[in-house]
Amino acid sequence: MIIMNYSKTFSFLLVFFTQPLLYAQNIETTTTKDQFIREVYTQALTEGKAYEDLRFLCKEIGARITGSTEAQMAIEWGKEKMTVYGLDVKLHEIQVPHWERGTKEAFYFKTSNGTHVKLRGLALGGSIGTNGTLRGDLIEFSSLDALKSAPSEMVTGKIVFVNQSMDAKQIQTFKAYGGCYPLRGNSASIAAEKGAIGTIIRSLGLASDPHPHTGSMYYAEGINKIPAAAICTSDADKIHAFFLDTPNETMEFVMEMDCRSFPDAISYNVIGEIKGTKYSDEIITIGGHLDSWDTGEGAHDDGAGIVHCLEAFRILKEMNYKPKHTLRLVFFMNEENGNKGGKTYAEWVKENGEKHFAALESDRGGFAPRGFTCDGTPEQVAWLVSIAPFFKDYDLHIFEKGYGGVDIGPLKKSYPEIPLFGFVPDSQRYFDMHHSPNDIFENVNKRELELGAAGIASFIYLLDHKQH
């Protein structure tokens, strides 16, 4: 009796410990793709590490602007996590811009009757400082186009306020953002060309709230550089209301910022790999950007994307999946203010003569997954559409032509034929946090983050099985 129980126990243990290996080795013949994807989701939702990994990145490291000590800490963290999860890891050295916000940011306006109204704002990334306190009459324009059309004599010597709202009629909020992006990037150069001494913009966010949103701005060649900042949407409404209520009054605007740029710094992309078993010389790149802006914690932008991809690789390794192609995980550095990580990576892989089969990016937040888009040929988009039935039970429905991502975008120049895929989560709340102090770990939902990681792991698996 005792011997019989021992034998049964040994047989059970033998099956239990060898099952993952057999499961992976026989996946083509004994396990359907549906079953594999179901197991991926089970792993993500019951054994997942994504939420804790994101917590550490946000809370123990924090905001990770390029060139900062925190960015270097994140690089070391990324290297360690990839190693612990069983990837072959290396660092890819790059040169990145180094801009610092400084310690002083103050904004207020003063009315003709002596009223002072303090405002909440942030310098735009790349702006020069004010060199002390900058004062000037404020002039409001409803849009960037209105500023472009204004005569120089209307603007000269003044501080320009461009109060252009994101288009709330857009269902997909990234389209609303795209329509306003030039406002942030170009308003300072356009205002300076007309003789302005400074510029502020309405933050790029749909909600009316107290959180200013930063982001990159650029100075046109040969144009005088003037300070540039974003004011939170609720304070932008205050300024607009003043001009509506007292159209004949002037408003003195006061701003002080001590931000500045430093010489370029050395930084790194973090790269981890799982070698392919059949097409080891063909690479599928998956990743997001490790840097963030220096306000908030970079939780949705792009801590969630980093963790999505890291967790996807961890799950595949945990399931002992043996990919056909070489799977490469890249934590890109410097997406926010230069994209040196993405540009340098594309040049580097081309110089090394590598073959690239496809690329995938997650950089749209950690909200509930909705699907994937493809920047590719009609045939490549058709393949994406063909895999939609695998995700029906998981509430993913977007499988269409669209955008890949900023970091993987430069690969198109090196490999014109490559399909670029973008992970698409729900976008409705993204711009409440984007580039603002509100982009913190507490605003990421654990289950939504885990579902995103499972969706990406499943997509990688199906992509790896895509026919040549």
Image: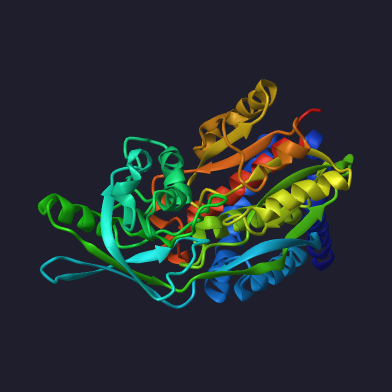
Pick the quarter of the image with the C terminus.
top right
**Is residue 454 rendered to the left or right of residue 320?**
left
Q: How many marks?
A: 0
The quarter holding residue 148 reads: top left
> Residue at point 39% right, 49% down?
194
> Residue at point 86% right, 46% down?
351
- Give x and y (percent) for residue 305: 58, 53
The answer to whether 67 is drawn above or below residue 87 in the figure is: below
- In the rendered image, is residue 163 in sight? no
- Give x and y (percent) for residue 241: 17, 53
> Residue at point 46% right, 45% down?
181
Between 265 and 219, the residue placed more toward the observer is 219
**Is residue 74 rendered to the left or right of residue 251?**
right
Between 259 and 249, the residue placed more toward the observer is 249
- Give x and y (percent) for residue 56: 57, 71
Pick the quarter of the image with the N terminus.
bottom right
The quarter holding residue 415 reads: top right
- In the rendered image, is residue 2 in sight? yes
- Give x and y (percent) for residue 425: 50, 44
